[in-house]
Amino acid sequence: MRKCSLDSINKIFGKIAETNKLYLPVDGSDGVAVYTKWEEGKEWSNALNTVRSPKDFFFPQVENLMEFKTSGKNIELTDIREEAEDFVIFGVRACDVRSFDILDRVFLTDPVDSFYASRREHGVIVSVACSKPSETCFCQTFDNIDATNPLGDVTAWKTEDSVYFKANTEKGEAFMKKIESLTEECDDTAVAAEKDKIAAIMKKLPLKDLSADAFGGGKTDTFFNVPEWDELSATCLGCGTCTFVCPTCQCYDIKDFNTGNGVIRYRCWDSCMYSEFTKMAHGNNRLSQKERFRQRFMHKLVYYPENNEGIFGCVGCGRCLAKCPISMNIVKVMKKIGGKVNE
Ligand code: SF4
Ligand code: SF4
């Protein structure tokens, strides 16, 4: 384990930025933390987390896939993808680190999504433990997420006066080598105390006892037709905010844009909450907002774990709790229908 003083963290950022693009949460003019490319003068935010998750780094909101031109019966395809470069994402919280595993199981399963795979290969993730978890956090509901000891290539802990680093992977070792001259060897006493402090906060969070035990693979028949979906979905606006802030939502659409000199095929995030999401040539198979709403939560709580060794498609980041305009969210769904099954 190595450490540096908090005062010297910008020197570390400068060192990393000499060879790699470095992104980290920085407070914007509205006070909201946003992942931003580091340059001299940018300060690491003290916010617990960003509103938009770091999934953008691997699965951007919009990306061009290819260009094609047609001439008679001929079609000329051009690969217009930008080559991925090595980059570092610094300050990723435990929940968001876990979300990458959930996305990997979608995009890296055969057929592998080469756009996503290339970015994953080039990205180094430096996580940071959550010094002050919030009332909307419930990562402890799900296995293998530990806010005191997040995963990633490197784990960092930020205390009042220092930042501690521990490498977890080969990429992490290379990162540590790069910052070796700016850090010093240390024992884990301060980190152990920080972990205890965080664990004590976690025990007091309002959602500390939230359980996902009622859900999981094989529960489609149990939950699909429960009457509670009517009430839960009644005021959903179908705005898609919950899906766009969610680090694990991965639905996208593919569209063509005629530039006048060819066609660019691009993909962009989509939302199962949108009325046209499942529209096909024959029409739409989810005609009501209730069906769309149910799909989102059934996917995270039943369908995803059914296909992924019991792993849930939610990481308890709390973004949908904070951002839904009608204050509807996955916790309310879990309590309403999961609680019913447990009764
Ligand atoms: S649950 Fe909330 S955030 Fe999601 S689509 Fe409905 S109104 Fe929008
Ligand atoms: S469903 Fe909500 S709490 Fe769960 S990962 Fe998505 S935004 Fe976070």
Image (cartoon, grey):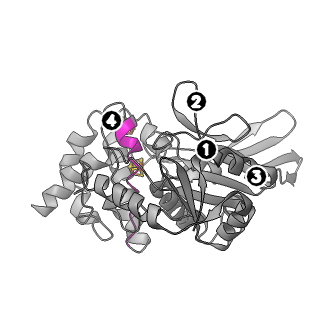
Q: Which residue is mark 4?
A: 236
Q: Main secondary structure of the magenta part?
A: loop
SS type, badge 3? helix
Q: Secondary structure at mark 1?
A: helix
Judged by depth in the image, the label closer to the viewer, 3 or 2, is 3
Q: Tell me what residue is drawn at x 83 percent, y 50 percent.
A: 80
Q: Position of residue 120 (x, y in %)?
A: 66, 62
Asked if residue 281 lies in the magenta stretch, the reply is no
- Residue 287, can we see it? no
Q: Nearer the viewer, mark 4 or mark 3?
A: 3
Total count of labels: 4
Looking at the image, tell me whether mark 3 or mark 1 is earlier in sequence order: 1
Callout 1 crowding tier (Cα within 10 Å): few <14, some 14–19, many ≥20 = few
Residue 246 drawn at (x, y percent): 46, 47
The kind of residue on which mark 4 rests is Cys
What residue is pinned by disc 2?
Answer: 28
User: Which mark is first along the chain, 2 or 4?
Assistant: 2
Q: For the residues marked 4 and 3, what is the alpha-carbon distance in whole angstroms?
A: 47 Å
Which residue matches tag 1?
A: 7
Query: Which residue type carries mark 3?
Result: Lys
Above or below for 27 versus 207: above
> Is the distance from the Cβ of mark 4 to the nearest ligand 1 atom less than 8 Å?
yes
> If the picture is divided into quarters, which one holds ligand 1?
top left
The earlier-in-sequence mark between 4 and 3 is: 3
Using the rendered image of the protein, determine whether residue 293 is visible from the camera's viewpoint.
yes
Residue at horizontal 14%, vertical 56%? 340
Specify few, some or many for label 4: CA neighbours under 10 Å numbering under 14, 14-19, or 20 or more.
Answer: some
Q: Residue at x 22, y 57 (%)?
A: 209
Q: Callout 2 environment at 10 Å: few (<14), some (14 to 19), or many (20+)? A: few
Q: Report which quarter residue 144 is drawn in.
A: bottom left
Q: State left or right for residue 198 relative to residue 81.
A: left
Segment colored magenta: 310-322
